[in-house]
Image: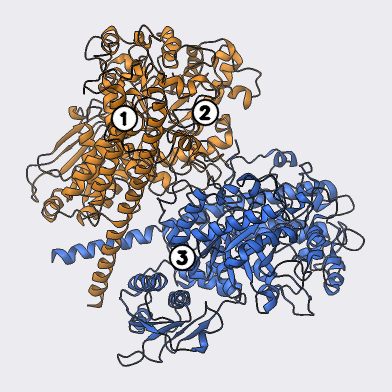
Chain colours: A blue, B orange
Amino acid sequence: MPRLFALAVIFASLALSSARSDDGYRLWLRYDRIENETYRTQAAPALGRIVLATPSGAESPTVAAARDELTTALGNLLGATPVITLEKLPAASSAVARSSDAFSVSSPSSFTPHSSPLTISASSDLGILYGTFALLRHLQTGQPLENLSLTSYPKIQHRLLNHWDDLNGHVERGYAGSSLWEWFYLPEIRNPRYHDYARACASLGLNGTVLTNVNANAQILTAPYLAKVAALAGEFRPYGIRVYLTARFSAPIEIGGLKTADPLDPAVAAWWKTKVAEIYRAIPDFGGFLVKANSEGQPGPQDYKRTHADGANLLADAVAPHGGIIMWRAFVYSPDNNDDRVKQAVTEFAPLDGKFRDNVIVQIKNGPLDFMPREPFSPLFGAMPKTRLAAELQITQEYLGQSTQLAFLAPMWREFLDADTFANGPGTTIASLIDGSTKRQQPSVIAGVANTGTDRNWTGHLLAQANWYAFGRLTWDHSLTSEQIADEWTKMTFGHDASVVSTITKLLLGSRETVVNYSMPLGLTHIMAEGHHYGPGPWVDKLGRADWTSVYYHRAAATGLGFNRTATGSNALAQYSPAIAQRYGSLTDCPENLLLWFHHVAWDHRLRSGRTLWDELCLRYQQGVDEVRAMRRDWDSLKGRIDDERFTHIQQRLTRQELDAIEWRDACLLYFQTFSKRPFPAGIEPPAHPLSHYISQKRRHMPGDPSGK
Amino acid sequence: MPRLFALAVIFASLALSSARSDDGYRLWLRYDRIENETYRTQAAPALGRIVLATPSGAESPTVAAARDELTTALGNLLGATPVITLEKLPAASSAVARSSDAFSVSSPSSFTPHSSPLTISASSDLGILYGTFALLRHLQTGQPLENLSLTSYPKIQHRLLNHWDDLNGHVERGYAGSSLWEWFYLPEIRNPRYHDYARACASLGLNGTVLTNVNANAQILTAPYLAKVAALAGEFRPYGIRVYLTARFSAPIEIGGLKTADPLDPAVAAWWKTKVAEIYRAIPDFGGFLVKANSEGQPGPQDYKRTHADGANLLADAVAPHGGIIMWRAFVYSPDNNDDRVKQAVTEFAPLDGKFRDNVIVQIKNGPLDFMPREPFSPLFGAMPKTRLAAELQITQEYLGQSTQLAFLAPMWREFLDADTFANGPGTTIASLIDGSTKRQQPSVIAGVANTGTDRNWTGHLLAQANWYAFGRLTWDHSLTSEQIADEWTKMTFGHDASVVSTITKLLLGSRETVVNYSMPLGLTHIMAEGHHYGPGPWVDKLGRADWTSVYYHRAAATGLGFNRTATGSNALAQYSPAIAQRYGSLTDCPENLLLWFHHVAWDHRLRSGRTLWDELCLRYQQGVDEVRAMRRDWDSLKGRIDDERFTHIQQRLTRQELDAIEWRDACLLYFQTFSKRPFPAGIEPPAHPLSHYISQKRRHMPGDPSGK
């Protein structure tokens, strides 16, 4: 009697505290008890017996991870402990033969003690783990469990996070605290987050992580640091997460004692071979190197009058005997080149097509500029038919409000993956160029610049977890829609209450376009404040390089607004296929959301709405503000429907986002008005301050900027 | 039936997870269910009815905080919800009259429905909160609840944490992540940790916090930042934590547009008065300023040929009308003064005795150097009889292994507080000089440099939480013994299992002496590596200033080891009272644990053990290593008796500590051997490497050093 009482009290107090606070640490793997009692009652017998059919039928750390995940998850979701058995997979099980990562989950049409058990089959232990997470997602999103036949394999072979993490703990363009990797404490002291990070990545199908910043530090390649990397690799290995590092091109000089890093120097090649062998002794499944060379001050082969291909091949030859790969970034724009910055990657790399080793992948940012709220796809996709190409996306919101503003990026990535390059005729989407479906594309890679950090909820803004989730899911299956991803993530993270799900998915799906509207609508780009990339700065006109300023990009003048990239301007359009060049080159046919990217447009030019450019521009900025206000109202309607901690967390951020959106609108419109000389149309709220006020605003002590004083 | 089953399952799974992991976030306020069923059963009726007797008998945010704490704590500890009622305190309740922070907790001799309820009385709402935490501590440590008559008041009026937190999030000498204050996000976005921080501080009786680094940034005094400070103050206010800021002396120039910060310039005085009035409008209970002036490059009154008293009084006059105080630091040593660094604070400050305003407190580090593992007390205590003096202790372990090594500091602080200055005759302890028991000492202040940060467990090393706890408890009652504090903290943090309590308290109590042994025994000091203050560097001989090097302090030579501070040397001893100077000045009477601080001692000089200095030095270093090994064995014996997460957390850190201790021993002994030219005595393990190896070791990317590349 006292015991039952105590139980009831504890339960009540837990229910209370769970209703009141959730700090977001568990991500989408929350495993709170399923609230729908009917579904839960049906699910329990369906998941009472689970068979894991693996190639060996034997336990391994990865199989143990799957078993632990099932036990914990089902215990919490259903209040029931499954009986899990291991079996040897029958030879030639065709359903799982497409990829070593493939899995199959099957179940009978009804669940009785005599029916066959639910079975997860895979041709690798890692496939079992992927199948486990797929099954749990199925359960967490409330899908039927009868007659299951989930079969899946990833379309892209290497699905990586790129951490721009410095060895001192700073994360470049990181807005969620410090680096997860505690280099000083490793290898003896291993933060339990390493394990949870690997679990979270594996749950999405990610299978690799580049631990270090592309602005690289050669120290990571020294023996003491490799011992630390090996400790991390050991933590990640059961979850199938392989580690990669960034290679500083001048490492042979900085830590090798050589006088040169010339890629054609035999001593340099020998040094890299020896160094790579040392790495593989410490980390037998090391993945390879990511390299930023001759870009924004980083050393590279051009320092020795060699090409990017020479540099990449040097490293490729060193890692090839061990099965490693080299991801060589195409993010280059020279300080000595006065041509339109967005053209320079093609200019530099297209002539090297066919000159890279088979284990080199050229890694290209989605757009030709730099992770702006909206860019056209980079014309380098489609311009190197003989080269393996990888897409580099940015999960961290460097130019989209960082960890303060809500911007769900799946629609942006969807736009990119679906873009038709016409490279091999109509229908040659970006996705088809990078997805490894042709031999020429193997090894295939997709990379996302991580938005993780030491903040308790991993990503700073709790809703930014959805971007980590969306990126991971798209790396496995780039055909998923934004709606599917938003729906999955919301249900896994916030439960199934219909108004919660509909409100949050609506917020997510509209949020990126809202950021575009209040910051850089109609194809405007790169008009942010100096240095920290947060907040407006269309007036920025003096920086180290012209192509770092805002005025370089918007070209505001009495004549109009926008960068002429047609044949009468920089002719960047010529780098695209003729079909695109023709459509985008036409002032009337160009998609209006990229209009000012490709055209310098007169203030009185009429858009499809019938409004002039100036009026439309003003209304888009106002619309962005109005949309944030609607987001706030929508969010406030959820009070009491989710725990207070997460409710308040997001409510406070949306409050701030409205202030930020207003600042963007007022600052940009007042500034552009100095060129347009036209009044604001009806419906535009008058700015609270004169332009000088916005210009004098100086943001200090930004997240991600520990050097600021 | 299904409901009961579900309850039981949930309980089991919770028990499992609670046995398996505890991340330390809850500090000593864990409130896990009391395991001793007898005690729990007796406690429940004793705490079933609680009366809070306050001056007004009315609810307030502080009373609500006390009520919430009781409800949550007793719900979790006992599984019972108390009935809490508010009453008006009878006038002239003498037990609580000594201080507005005083409280009284009383209970009847037995608990029946007709006996009087347990009552917490106080002459302020904050006293009720302090009484609440005292009662909960009483319960958490398993004390009897009958016939309670707990009456307590703090001996020191202002009990402060000093955060050396920069506005960019970096914590100077912080080793537990970044600053808790998220300046960029404030005021709209308020981390829930602010609330938990205030709760934790209040639970110890702390009542103030200096938010910013003594190496100050004037930006904190600008309007946008004051709005952020006000938001923090609002979060802290219900818990009685007042905010203070550091004042950059040159702020009138940097943010005020003046040409000078001369403290005697009327425009400067007017600027500070206006600025302070602005602060008090935003934060009506603002506490005042902490100032580091003319010290290590900080600006100050001497820049204008004025004295520290001129500078302090300038600010004191500005805050006085609002009830604020100025804490003016005495940590000064001039780059132009070649005299023994440890003498300079007295040289500078003693002549200013009597010249400070009544609301100025001169804040003095415990020792005359800088928070070393062992120092004698600063002779400035006792050298300024007409001045209010505050003690500044360092909770963060800058020189004691930071957040990697275990060093429980209560014994060190106890040693300091009990030190007899003989200032007013024998028995004039430091505690009696700072504790506010005489009018001359009001306002009284004690400050501790915080060891908190964004690490999940607040302090990096979980056992370093005990230092935050110990500091807070000593600020309230400086008569507590180290043993009492260790016992309380251990029971509150790890429960009552006898072997857990005895093992952990033993580890804690011996740990600081162990660090002394393997790093700086026998009065050695300041022989750490360059820059980061972690690890050995007795060879460091070239830095910006001689008194930053190691050789300045240890004076190793063929003749012996140690710094002669007797009359034949720097005569720093003359700054102490004659009784101390005489005893410490004698080679035979000087406490051996300070021997090399005060004396240059011949290598063959016999110590009390009968061993030569050289042999004793060697054996102390070896003893330090042996003690860490014993700590590891003791800790390992707790496997299974505490949750795995905390077990592993500390086990990994002790593993690292042994490696560090071995490095200290080997590096120091090999180095000093180059002077002693003597062999190691029996029992010393031979170093694994030659001295050159230890000198070449370069630690990189240290916690707390984000600038390191």
**Which disc is residue B618 wearing?**
1
Q: Nearer the viewer, residue B61 or A457?
A: A457
**Is any part of residue A677 visible from this angle?**
no
| Neighbour tally class for label 1: few under 14, some 14-19, many 20 plus, Cα within 10 Å | many
Q: Secondary structure at mark 2?
A: loop
Tag nearer the camera, 3 or 1: 1
Q: Nearer the viewer, residue A15 or B143?
A: B143
Give the mark, 1 or 2, whose residue is nearer the N terminus: 2
Instruction: Please give left or right for residue B287 compared with residue B625 in the image.
Output: right
| Neighbour tally class for label 3: few under 14, some 14-19, many 20 plus, Cα within 10 Å | some
To which chain does the residue with label 2 belong?
B
**Is any part of residue A42 visible from this angle?**
yes
Q: Secondary structure at mark 1?
A: helix
Q: CA distance from mark 2 to mark 3?
A: 44 Å
| Neighbour tally class for label 2: few under 14, some 14-19, many 20 plus, Cα within 10 Å | many
**Which disc is residue A57 wearing?**
none
Instruction: Please give left or right for residue B291 compared with residue B461 in the image.
Output: right
Q: CA distance from mark 1 to mark 2?
A: 39 Å
User: Which corner quadrant of the image does residue B297 belong to?
Assistant: top right
Q: Which amino acid type is marked by label 3?
A: Arg
Tag nearer the camera, 2 or 3: 3
Instruction: Please give left or right for residue A333 compared with residue B308 in the image.
Output: right
Q: CA distance from mark 3 to mark 1?
A: 44 Å
Q: Which amino acid type is marked by label 1?
A: Cys
To which chain does the residue with label 1 belong?
B
Q: Which amino acid type is marked by label 2?
A: Asn
Q: Which residue is mark 3?
A: A237
| Image position of B213 with respect to B41: above or below | above
Q: Secondary structure at mark 3?
A: helix
Q: Nearer the viewer, residue B534 or A553?
A: B534
Q: Which residue is mark 2?
A: B215
